[in-house]
Image (cartoon, helix red, strand yellow):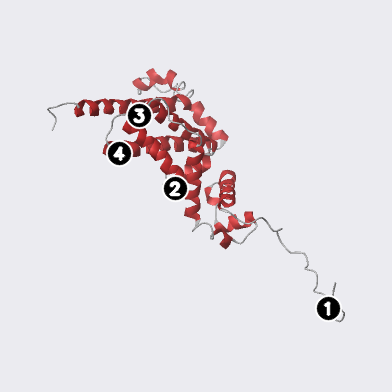
Amino acid sequence: MTDPGTTAAPEPGPRRGRPPRAGLSRERILDAAASVIEREGPDALTLRRLGADLGSNHTAVLRHFTGKDDILLGLTERLIAEAIDGFEAGGSWRDTLAALARRMRRVCLAHPRIAVLVTSRVSRRGAEFSGADTVIGALRQAGFDDRDAARYYRALVDTALAMGAFEAAFAALDPEAREGDRMAWRREYLVASPARYPHLAAAAPYLAEADEDDHFETTLALLLDAVELRARRAQTAGSDPTRD
């Protein structure tokens, strides 16, 4: 109750603008950033846009991230974390590397616009470290010393991510453009002049058979075959008593 002779404090009036939202967190900000990129593309992602979507001033985002680039690194880490979630090494180093590459491809195709934007980045966070540890461990299991394991880790991971980004860029195309590119293998390539392009004309009927899945698996097999060959050479050289 109010004491006699005093005036009660006025009831607070309704707030204007957006209704208040739950407190910001890194995860909520990353959710919002991912949603903007997946719906509208990377150019739409700005701090002001994030603040508006989250019902906050954009400066509130800076309490959790140092800037837009830090948000992109967070999305990079998310992509990797999704790829390795629940992953267990296979029975052989080759099985392990192949399974990881396939997982990364699936994640890139599930989030193509994000993948195109972040697969070239180095997240420098826990999920990336965990993935690196698994890949390097598989290469050491193959018989490489630490220096070669480091070199081949960089080469394999960058190539796998490049493949994922390439497919993601294709998946992010306008559907009409995407279908036009697919059909080119069955139209323009089939009518290429045998007189001018004899080798292409001979192989043209089979080009359409090499779809995205076949392309990925063939490239992956070529990479792993090369790693296996080098591993055998390293083991042979290491057992050669005449080697310096």
Task: Say what secondary structure mark 4 lies in.
Answer: helix
- Report the amino acid beneath label 3: Leu
Q: Position of residue 39 (x, y in %)?
A: 59, 44
Image disc number at residue 141: none
Label 2: how many Cα within 10 Å (few below 14, some 14–19, many 20+): some
Tell me how far mark 1 sits from mark 2, CA to CA.
Answer: 57 Å
Image disc number at residue 223: 3
Task: Say what secondary structure mark 2 lies in.
Answer: loop
Q: Closer to the camera, 47 or 40?
A: 47
Q: Closer to the camera, 240 or 124?
A: 240
Image disc number at residue 7: 1
> Can you say whether 199 is above or below 97 in the image?
above
Q: Position of residue 47 (x, y in %)?
A: 55, 57
Q: Do labels 4 and 3 touch, CB within 8 Å?
A: no
Residue at 61% of width from left, 62% of height from top? Answer: 57
Dot placed on the residue nearer the N-terminal end, 1 or 2: 1
Q: Position of residue 130 (x, y in %)?
A: 43, 41
**Foreground disc of the pair 4, 1:** 1
Residue denoted by label 2:
125
Q: Tell me, yes or no, if residue 65 can be seen here.
A: yes
Quadrant of the rendering where the C terminus is positioned: top left
- Report the amino acid beneath label 1: Thr
Task: Say what secondary structure mark 3 lies in.
Answer: helix
Residue 159 sits in quarter: top left
